[in-house]
């Protein structure tokens, strides 16, 4: 598993690899944990939302938790990756705890249809979304991710400018993500493309195959709220079926006591 961290208003770039452990044995406990952490970390995103509405957002707050046991961590002094990274490596004996047992039954189908024309979406993402990241799989089978310093569409490919001190050379199957959100988190926009990447001269060329469906919340507060609630209604049946696959009831939203 890959974890990339780019703190707000910080030039430091961090990336970690680790072994993932899936925690979904107790969906109610997971939900309680996410409610507590989300409301505590991002109060502006929920400010003004009546508690009766928050209690109806099960399809948003119900979560599967992924624990990550770090194996490698890199960090650079700048997002431009213009210097060699510092690196920490876990002892060779490091192991991850076992995951909870996988649920039985058939996994539900995708709840969002992917968009068709990736080119138009790429043009809009280049114009609007300032944070860009490229991810690919290294020779050991682990995903890696680095910031994209510049991107330009040339005919049917995207030409990328990356830093000079990468953890490995991007090559092969890849994922290119554009994203943006206010420093005080009240909404988000994101767009992700799947394709292949390879070196070409001083730059890298990303050959997009398709765009993935996104979970953006653009616009003013009213527009974001309407879009969000529509998504929640579409997700609710999926939460019920996933809880049933695990032999658990649909979780309830237990809000902390109002101060």
Image: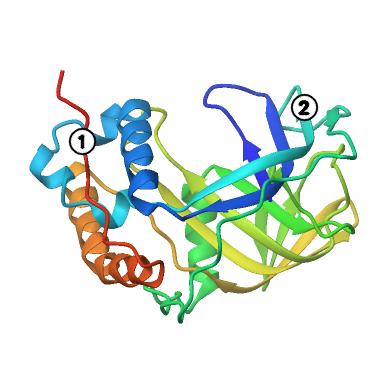
Quadrant for the C terminus, please.
top left
Foreground label between 2 and 1: 1
The mark found on residue 76 in the picture is: 2
Instruction: State the colouring used for the structure image.
Output: rainbow
- Identify which residue is drawn at 46% across, 81% down: 106
Residue 110, image x, y percentages:
42, 75
Q: Nearer the viewer, residue 103 or 76?
A: 103
Q: Is residue 31 above or below residue 183?
A: below
Q: Is residue 163 above or below residue 201?
A: above
Disc 2 + disc 1, Cβ < 8 Å: no
- Identify which residue is drawn at 75% across, 58% down: 136
Answer with left or right where residue 55 lies relative to residue 237.
left
Mark 2–mark 1 Cα distance, whole angstroms, equals 39 Å
Total marks in image: 2
When asked about the image quadrant of residue 4, the answer is top right
When asked about the image quadrant of residue 232, the answer is bottom left
**What residue does disc 1 label?**
255
> Can you see residue 58?
yes
Q: Nearer the viewer, residue 82 or 14?
A: 14
Q: Nearer the viewer, residue 78 or 111?
A: 111
Q: Judging from the image, what secondary structure is the residue with disc 2 in?
A: strand
- Identify which residue is drawn at 17% across, 44% down: 54
Answer with left or right where residue 22 lies relative to residue 33.
right
Q: Judging from the image, what secondary structure is the residue with disc 1 in?
A: loop
- Identify which residue is drawn at 37% across, 68% down: 242
Q: Residues within 10 Å of mark 1 (few under 14, many from 20)?
A: some
Residue 171, image x, y percentages:
84, 62
């Amino acid at each position: 598993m890959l974890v990339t961290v780019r703190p707000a208003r910080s030039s430091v770039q961090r990336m970690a690899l680790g072994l993932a452990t899936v925690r979904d044995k107790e969906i109610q406990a997971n939900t309680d944990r996410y409610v507590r952490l989300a409301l505590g970390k991002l109060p502006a995103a929920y400010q003004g939302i009546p508690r009766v509405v928050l209690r109806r957002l099960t399809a948003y707050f119900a979560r599967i938790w992924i624990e990550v046991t770090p194996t490698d961590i890199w960090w650079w002094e700048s997002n431009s990756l213009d210097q060699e990274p510092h690196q920490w490596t876990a002892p060779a004996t490091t192991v991850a705890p076992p995951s909870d047992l996988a649920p039985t039954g058939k996994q539900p189908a995708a709840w969002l249809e992917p968009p068709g024309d990736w080119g138009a979406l790429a043009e809009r993402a280049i114009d609007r979304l300032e944070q860009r990241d490229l991810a690919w799989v290294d020779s050991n089978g682990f995903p890696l991710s680095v910031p994209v310093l510049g991107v330009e569409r040339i005919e049917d490919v995207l030409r990328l400018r990356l830093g000079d001190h990468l953890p490995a050379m991007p090559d092969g199957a890849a994922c290119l993500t554009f994203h943006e959100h206010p420093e005080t988190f009240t909404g988000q926009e994101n767009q992700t493309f799947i394709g292949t990447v390879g070196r070409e001269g001083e730059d890298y060329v990303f050959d997009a195959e398709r765009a993935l469906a996104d979970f953006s919340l653009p616009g003013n507060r009213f527009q974001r709220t309407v879009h969000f609630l529509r998504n929640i209604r579409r997700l609710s049946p999926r939460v019920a079926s996933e809880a049933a696959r695990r032999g658990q009831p649909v979780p309830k939203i237990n809000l902390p006591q109002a101060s």
